[in-house]
Image (spheres, grey):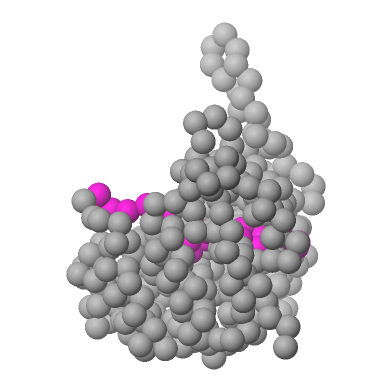
Amino acid sequence: MNLEKILLLSGDGIGPSVMSSAEEVINMTTDSVEIVHGEIGRSAYESTGQYLPHDTLDLLDECKVIFTGPTIPPENGMEPKESLKVQLDLFAKTRFFKTLAPDLGVEDMEVVLWNSNNFLNDEITEVPDLDGITLTKYVRNNAYNRMMTIALSDVEIRKLSKIACLTREDFFPVSSGMFSEAFDSLFPSEYYETRHLNVKEWMAKVIKNPKLDECIVCVDLYNQIVAGVLSGLTGYDYLSPTCFVGIDYKMYDPCKKALPSGLEIEYANPTSAIISAAQRLGEMGLKDEYDRIIDAVCDTYASNERTPDVGGTLTTAEFTERVIRRI
């Protein structure tokens, strides 16, 4: 049996503990994955003199899927995870939002958000003049099609049918038109229940009917706003894992919040890392394993066995043990 190799880059701060939780859950659930360890961030610099060591890059020849923890960036130069995204051409970005317990958000809500992952240095320029600054955004012709092709594959794997396309044609009619055309060509209405909405119109509707969409494909300028609304409807921003996707590589980056103020590092919430592990197994076709992990996380939350940031008292290791016990 050919094992899928996942490159685990624990990073700095809470990274080693929450990435360990993802590794434990994967190892507990399946024997179809081999975890390979590499270094990145300040901890890598202290041992190798590089924030993104050559040895880590060499591992990418055999590992096409990467899990990364948070990193402390260098004082000068690009943050190592951002450098990795550029080198691997991770041009699409997706986030998974799910309400884990009724007290955290809208009960039973679950939605996937897709948008382009723009590298700002390449696509947005600032031109100063006497009165201020002019911002210019460059949109490549095939950028939307590339992202939506990846999104379509994900929709097919998840067996989703209700897809929303969000634009701002009142502000950017030409680029919004390009986006909508790409969407319609890849998500035909005869196969999917699609709808086109202005971002502000969508925000008004989603408050009244939060569970109307299963997947949202959004223009990149407004994805942070949409993600913020979805985070509020399902819980907290840092509970929703992020994944950056390209043709050959995929990088899960679940740790968007280092640690709530006043908490010790051993109380970091590993939920996003554990859900990322479930997401990857589901993409591998391991639907039963995916369901078992997600159900175990929800049952653990329902039992109020949580870390302090979401109303509990458990440490990272204790929460992970409660989830594994339920798998």
Residue at 42%, 88% (x, y): give it. Answer: 327
Residue 214, image x, y percentages: 53, 74
Residue at 25%, 78% (x, y): give it. Answer: 305
Q: Residue farthest to the top? A: 130
Residue placed most toward the observer, 30 or 222: 30
Q: Main secondary structure of the magenta part?
A: loop
Q: Is residue 54 above or below residue 190?
A: above
Residue 182, image x, y percentages: 75, 58
Residue 8, image x, y percentages: 56, 64
Residue at 51%, 36% (x, y): give it. Answer: 74
Residue placed most toward the observer, 148 or 241: 241
Q: Is residue 148 left or right of residue 308?
A: right
Q: Is residue 72 left or right of residue 6?
A: left
Question: Was residue 101 drawn as part of the magenta stretch in this picture?
Answer: no
Region of the chain picked out in magenta, as a range: 241-261
Question: Was residue 243 drawn as part of the magenta stretch in this picture?
Answer: yes
Residue 247, image x, y percentages: 76, 61
Residue at 58%, 79% (x, y): give it. Answer: 281
Q: Is any atom of residue 192 visible in this view?
A: no
Q: Is residue 214 left or right of residue 180?
A: left
Q: Quadrant of residue 298?
A: bottom left
Q: Is residue 255 above or below residue 195?
A: above
